[in-house]
Every structure is written in C-alpha cells, then in structure tokens.
Amino acid sequence: MNSNISIYIPAYNAEKTIEKSLNSILNQSIKPDKILIINDHSTDATLEILNKYKDKISIINNPKNMGVSYSMNVANKYLTSRYVAKIDADVELENHWIEKLLTKIKGKNFVMIGGKMYEKYIDNPFNFWRSQRLKQNWGENDIINPNFIFGCNNILDTTKIDIIKKYRIDNNYFKTNGEDIEICNFFKKNNLNTFYDSQTVCYHLQDDDGKSLSNRYWRYLYYGDGLKKRNFFKTIKNIIRQIKKTLKWTIEDIIKLNFKLVIVNFIILFYFINIDFKFYLQNRND
C-alpha cells in the first residue's frame, strides 16, 4: 500500500547505532514507500552496514563530508512523496511512530510534526546529564507551534512549503547545521504551523563520555545562539555565563542528592571553556 511517506537518515560515522535505527524503521506498523540513507562520507563501517540492507533501502553517498544540512537538502530533493520523515542515525523508533505522526498531520494545518525522544542509556551519568539538561522533547503535553520541532525525529508535509521555492533562489530547505531552529523560525515568519506530539515516542541511542557530551552541548548552544560572530568579549561572556550555570546546576544537584551530576557539571565546564576559546582563536580573523 502506498502510504505517500518516505523517510531518510543523514548518517556520518554511525556504525554503533545505524543498524538499530534502520531496524526500527523496517518494523513500523505503516511502512514508508522509500527508506533513504545519506551517507555523509563516513570513515567507519557505516557504509558496510548499510550495504547489508541495500535490497530494502536507497543509499546516496556524499563525495566528501558535507554536514547534516547538505544531506537533508539532498534527501528532500530526491524524495517525491507528500510526507517526508527524518530521523537521526542514533534514533530508535517505537513501532507505531510513523502511524501516529502521520495520523496527526493528515488533514491538519501543520507543515511539520515531531514526536518525543527519551535517552535510552541513562545509567551512564553523562547520558543522564544530557537527559536532564539537553532534552529533545517538550514534555508531556501536546503543543501547537512549540519553540521548534527537534530535528532528530519529525515529518514534513511538502505541499505546504512551496513558499520556500519562491523565497530561496537555490531551493534549499535547510541553510545551516542548526537546521531545526532555522527552519522552524522560517515557518513562523510565514505563518506555517508546527505541532509537537507528546504521545509518539523514540529513543536516543547515543552513549556519551565527557568530551563527546561537551562537544554536543557546545554545538547546541552555538546553533541556538543564531551562529553569531565571535569576538574576545563575546567569548568571555559565554564562559562567564557557563560558570554561572554550572554553579546553579551544582547547587540544585546537591539539594536533590544527584552527586554524580556534580562531577559531570565540572567536566562539561572544563571542556566548554577549552572548546569555546579554541573556536574564538580559530575564527577571530573571519
């Protein structure tokens, strides 16, 4: 049966998680018409794993590492179904994810709809920290026009975005690697509605250590900051803000007896200062 929905995954060095993501798509109660993987020039075993599924999926290999927004634009130009779903390469869907979101978006005035993602491996203190401070969901209630739809799991109704073709000369939906915030801001400016569905669940398979979590957290703040240009004073301001956050979090964690998070707070602070200052040094002449 033609469901008029396709799904894609941008994948870069996703050997640890891509197979679980693919299997969760193949086990959906409503099957997508096409499953597309954009392999962003992975240097690990990602492509080898994908080739095991080549009779069930389509694969596009980028000639070099281009970034997630480039891969997303490739997918949206390649896929022709009305509804285009997207998940990250480290996301595992519950079996009715497509069915639930597709039911909610059909017949509604929503250009994009997203579900709720939980962290799967919270026994790891770094993942538990992320589940508390980098949540990729908006909580337990449905929301029309949330701040943005998380890029990790969503469905786009392509019939409602012809305005992008008129507005953007290059016809690219996604301009930056902060694609979820960027595209949702564009929707808001053009009176296009989005929807957060709190009942449709998926799971984040990422398993972080201190360094990887710090890099993830720094990127989250960078893209959320609107990709502003940096100078020395902006960098110092960011670091001071992060020190204040760390102290606030630490007090809260001690009160709640979450002592394992106290250690993570200061590991994140240490790496954050290093990452932010290195970024300033590398970009100060731009």
Image (spheres, rainbow, N blue to C red):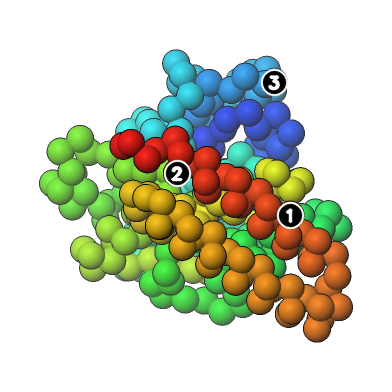
Task: For the C terminus, give its image quadrant.
Answer: top left
Give the residue at x 56% y 32%: 11
Q: Amino acid at mark 1?
A: Ile
The residue closer to the viewer here, 78 or 123, is 123
**Distance (Cα) linking label 1 and label 2:** 20 Å
**Distance (Cα) linking label 3 and label 1:** 30 Å
Q: Which mark is residue 280?
A: 2
Q: Amino acid at mark 2?
A: Tyr
Q: Which mark is residue 267?
A: 1
Give the residue at x 44% y 16%: 63
Q: Which residue is mark 3?
A: 45
The residue closer to the viewer here, 240 or 159, is 240
Does residue 242 appear left or right of residue 76 in this picture?
right
- Give whichever of discs 3 and 2 has the lower sequence position: 3
The answer to whether 8 is drawn above or below residue 238 in the figure is above
Query: Around disc 3, counting alpha carbons within 10 Å, would you say few (fewer than 14), some (14 to 19), or many (20 or more)?
Result: few
Does residue 281 appear left or right of residue 132 in this picture?
left
Residue 42 spot, x, y in % from top left: 59, 22
**Distance (Cα) linking label 3 and label 2:** 33 Å
